[in-house]
Amino acid sequence: MTPITVNGTAIPSPDMPFKWSLNDISSEDSGRDLNGRMDKDEVAKKVTLDCTWSHRTTSEISTLLNAVKPHTFVQVNYPDPMTGSYVTKTFYTGDVNCEMDVSNDEEMYWSAKLTFIER
């Protein structure tokens, strides 16, 4: 897989499956009426990328976090199943969770979870 880039910097490839979702954003006028009929005022569609990196070196996790977290918004180039090609869109990130594990030879390894949410 071609690397995913954040602001032009290649980040470690996330674990598979790479999770892509397309979310409908509806106005507050959307909802069901008293007959149960749905009225939907869709104002946008936004992509969410749920990514996990497991058992990575400190250097790999540091590269990832330093590419993403100093910024409120980032340009992410990623494989998009809807277009069938790589696209670049602006995302912000939710909270990042990292867990550390120490191997038998005292080497530190990290796992991280990160969600990119289209602006």
Image: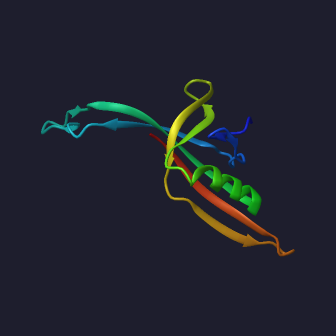
Snapshot quadrant of residue 99: bottom right
Whether residue 57 is visible here, answered yes or no, is no
Instruction: Name, please, the residue furthest toward the right.
Output: 105
> As drawn, is 2 to the left or to the right of 86?
right
Residue ID at (64%, 54%): 66
> As drawn, is 108 to the left or to the right of 92?
right
Query: What colour scheme does the image use?
Result: rainbow
Q: Position of residue 69 (x, y in %)?
A: 57, 54
Q: Position of residue 113 (x, y in %)?
A: 59, 57
Residue ID at (68%, 54%): 53
Instruction: Name, please, the residue furthest toward the left.
Output: 34
**Which sits in the foreground, 90 or 27?**
90
> As drawn, is 96 to the left or to the right of 55?
left
Split into 4 quadrants, where in the image is the C terminus?
Answer: top left
Query: Looking at the image, is 50 positioned above or below residue 96?
Result: above
Q: Position of residue 34 (x, y in %)?
A: 12, 39
Snapshot quadrant of residue 84: top right
**Which sits in the foreground, 34 or 53?**
53
Q: Position of residue 45 (x, y in %)?
A: 41, 32
Residue ID at (31%, 31%): 42
**Which sits in the foreground, 39 or 47?**
47
Whether residue 112 is visible here, answered yes or no, is yes
Figure label count: 0
Residue ID at (83%, 75%): 106
Split into 4 quadrants, where in the image is the N terminus?
Answer: top right
**Which sits in the foreground, 83 or 40?**
83
Query: Looking at the image, is 100 positioned above or below residue 37?
Result: below
